[in-house]
Image: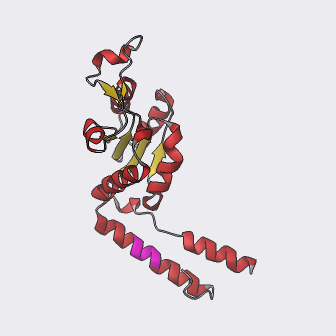
Amino acid sequence: NDFESAVLNEVKQFRLDPMPDQEDEIVVWTEGAGVVPMVRQFVDPYSVEVISSGGMDGLHIKKQISDRFRDRTAIIFHLGDRDPTGEVMHQALREDLLAFGAQVKFHRLAVTPQQISEWQLQTKPVKRRGNTHSKSFDGKETVELEAIPPEKLKTLLINAIEGHLGSDAFEKTQARSKEIRRQLLRRYGLGDRE
């Protein structure tokens, strides 16, 4: 029974990675480490990597990512606060990865001024005193990434990923994964327990 349960559990979790068939690899880069577990749950079916260096991004992780993407292009979906520091971090990430020679395409997914307006996200006034980043910030209010409701963030990520992958490619990978799970269940005499 333990063997059967273990095999059944492993088979149910099996899925093919849709990324190898893609020309570009997708990475989600978050400004804060606090949202990483939630974001990983959202993008797990797509085998998309989620990165956060927490706070101001260090050069070490940027160098590692740049080395990875010298010969293959990465699509980076960036999630960050809409505030002076968040804007500087996004720009610095882009500039540093390109300076290290990475082949990357950037998409700022959140937080954007349009999302603040459409979703009526909770705002705070910009703290300008003592904040050197605020001089170049054009907004009057700030919004933290965590202000976006989880379901909206999940939809935003899935739409971005499927928009790049193409829903047909993802659906074909899902269908192939399901067929392999069925074959494995039959092979181990577990029938159709998916």
Task: Residue at 50% x, 34% y: name it.
Answer: 53
Task: Residue at 38% x, 31% y: name it.
Answer: 93
Q: Where 99 falls versus 64 (above or below)?
A: above
Task: Inspect this view and state whether residue 41 appears.
Answer: yes
Q: Where 157 falls versus 103 (above or below)?
A: below
Q: Position of residue 119 (x, y in %)?
A: 31, 44
Based on the displayed image, in which of its 4 quarters is residue 68 positioned? top left
- In the image, 28 versus 132, the foreground residue is 132
Task: Inspect this view and state whether residue 70 appears.
Answer: no
Q: Position of residue 150 (x, y in %)?
A: 43, 50
Residue at the top extreme, as displayed: 130
- In the image, 149 versus 70, the foreground residue is 149
Quadrant that contains the N terminus: bottom right
* Main SS, magenta residues: helix
Q: Is residue 177 magenta?
A: yes
Q: Is residue 53 left or right of residue 147?
A: right
How many numbered marks appear?
0
Task: Residue at 41% x, 47% y: name it.
Answer: 149
Based on the displayed image, in which of its 4 quarters is residue 148 positioned? top left
Q: Position of residue 4 (x, y in %)?
A: 69, 80
- In the image, 13 versus 126, the foreground residue is 126
Task: Residue at 51% x, 83% y: name it.
Answer: 182
Residue at the right extreme, as displayed: 2
Q: Where 132 falls versus 18 (above or below)?
A: above
In this picture, which residue range is highlighted in magenta?
174-178
Q: Where 175 falls versus 144 (above or below)?
A: below
